[in-house]
Every structure is written in structure tokens, then in C-alpha cells.
Image: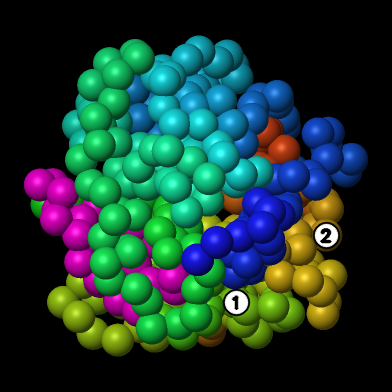
Amino acid sequence: MRFKTTAIIVLALTGLIAPSVAGASTTTSVRPTAGRLLVSGLSGTIGGAIGPDGALYVPEGAAGRITRVDPKTGDTSTFADGLPPQVLPLGGAIDVAFVGRTAYVLVTLVSADVGGTQVDGIYRVDGPHRATVVADLGAWSVAHPPRTAFDVPTGLQFALVRVTGGFLVSDGHHNRVLRVTDGGAVSEAIAFDNVVPTGLAVSGRTVYVAQAGPVPHTPDTGKVVAFRRNGRPARDIASGYSVMVDVAVNDDALYAISQGDSPGQVEPATPAKPDSGKLLRVKRDGTFEVLVDQLNRPTSVHFVDDVALIVTLNGEVWRIDDIDERHGGPEHDE
């Protein structure tokens, strides 16, 4: 399939993120209801991970690097560079996971079908300036197209999470979660209808998936669902906020990130409204408790004890302290 402009490709990517990067404000116009700005000025940020040293590692897709963020001081340093940079306003290095002290990076939207020359897949960081492809997700996706409609054959891989013996990867364009072994073999873990799976979290044998839902992004289609790695179908856990982009487990509690309020019946990939993002806690009754409001287009959340570190599309990291004191204790069990 040929595209006349990269703008067509961006609009074709189901649902949520690309124009958010291109059109996002570079400043936070409204201070969140809690927390402090830890870092600003990063470029092309979506995911991240807590490393073995307790620091936050954030891929900068526009710069082709991973930045280490001290969660206490906000001091930053380059952990690794030389990764494939963005071709579009979204993509490049988008998420990271650790196996011991070794970092693995998810890289997306850098292949030939979007005008790039690199591999969409999982890269192992071998040194400060070296990385090796260990799984070619783009090639596998081309050879195994999804059952839902698509415009980009290689997909849009969004989130990476470590599981025993390998990784799980969400694909928000192909509406599925992929399973990747440590040896690089790829298979389909679960397929969805047009729900735009985004963030991932794992607790034991249970996998949690955030779903942004199709346009228009309504609160009832913004969900967290769960499936067992033994192949059982997914089931709804909670819904009620639009443009769900991440999910996380911390101290037996389940959290989620809503990018914000949807503008309504708009063009595909229109971002959520500025300063309307939320950090949410999942309750047993299938609803959410709002812990932090007025976040400016957040994309992922990461925990160090009872501290939440929130990454935004604007290249910011916010620190939210005392998460345990913001609610009455764990409410969700599997």
C-alpha cells in the first residue's frame, strides 16, 4: 500500500496518539491537583520503566535515546543512544523493559511502509551506543496480518512488558497483544476487535490491558481488561474514563491512566483535551477512583514504592508522592 503523505499515515493509525505528539503544548498550562514537575524538555515520550537501580528510564523517540531520570532529584543522563529515531510524529523508541540489568527497547514506526529504513521490533541494549535487534515484530506482523482493518502493515507496537521466558507487546493499530520469546520467536497472545490496546501490566499469570477504544472515545469504551496467559478470553475489569493509555500494578492495587476527556466525534487520532488527564485506581465494583486530575496528556505511570512517576506526551515527568495515602488500601485482587 502506498501513501501520498505521512499525514495520511498518522491519521490512519487507529485512535489516539500521533497528533497528540505533534500538537501537544510544550508547557503545562494547569498544574495537576497533586505532585511536582520532576523533568521537562524530553522529546517524543510515551513509555518507560523502573530500572534495577530504582531510577526511571524513559525512551525519547524523537532523539533515538533512553534517558535515565533520578526519581528524587529529577537529574537526567543519557543511558543509551543511537536507536532508530522517529520517522513520524510518533514512534522510534517507545517503551523499555529490563531483564536483570539489561535493557530491552521497543521500537516502532521506523520501517519502510512509513518511509523509514529500520526494523520495528525489540532491541537489546548492548552498550551506551550499541543495540541489537532480537525480535523483528514488523516483519512478523506483515506475514501475519490482523483480522481487523489496518493501514500500516507493520503495525504500531505501543507497550512492552517482561514475562517469564520473554515479553508481551501491545499493538494499538493491529488490535492485539503479541508474545515474544527470549529467542525472538513471535506469536499472537490475544486478538481484540477495534478497541486500541495500549498499556500493559502483569501480575502472576494475569495480564492487564488498557484500551483506548475506537473513535469517538467515550468513557464506556475506555477500559482495563484482563486475560490469563493460559489462553482464557479477556474480561472487563473497569471502565468509565476515555482514552485509557496505561495500566499498572503496585502493592496489590491496580492503577490506570486516562489521557483525558475526548473532544467527541472528531477525526481519528485527535488527542484528548489538554489538562484533563487522570491517574486512576481500579475499584472492586468495576469503577475508578480519581487520585490525580488535570494532567496534561499523560501516557504512562511507573511506581517506586508509594511514589508514582507519570510520563506525558509533552516531554515531562511528574512525581506524585504518598499514593498509599490517597485511598484506603488495595481493592483489587486476582
> What residue range appears in magenta?
167-191
Residue at the spot x=53%, y=45% of the render?
115
Can residue 22 be seen at all in this image of the molecule? yes
Residue at the spot of label 2: 273
User: Is 91 rendered above or below residue 66?
Assistant: below
Q: Residue 220 appears at what percent x and percent y? A: 65, 84
Q: Amino acid at mark 2?
A: Lys
Q: Indicate which disc residue 18 carries.
A: none
Give the CA separation, mark 1 to mark 2.
16 Å
- Left or right of 298 in this view: 145: left
Q: Position of residue 162 (x, y in %)?
A: 26, 49
Residue 206 seen in the figure: no
Q: From the viewer's perspective, tell me whether residue 86 is left or right of residue 231.
A: right
Circle 2 residues within 10 Å: few <14, some 14–19, many ≥20: some
Q: Which residue position is annotated with label 1? A: 213
- Name the colour scheme: rainbow
- Identify residue type, mark 1: Gly
Bin the neighbour count of mark 1 within 10 Å (Cα to Cα): few under 14, some 14-19, many 20 and up. many
User: 258 or 213: which is nearer to us?
Assistant: 213
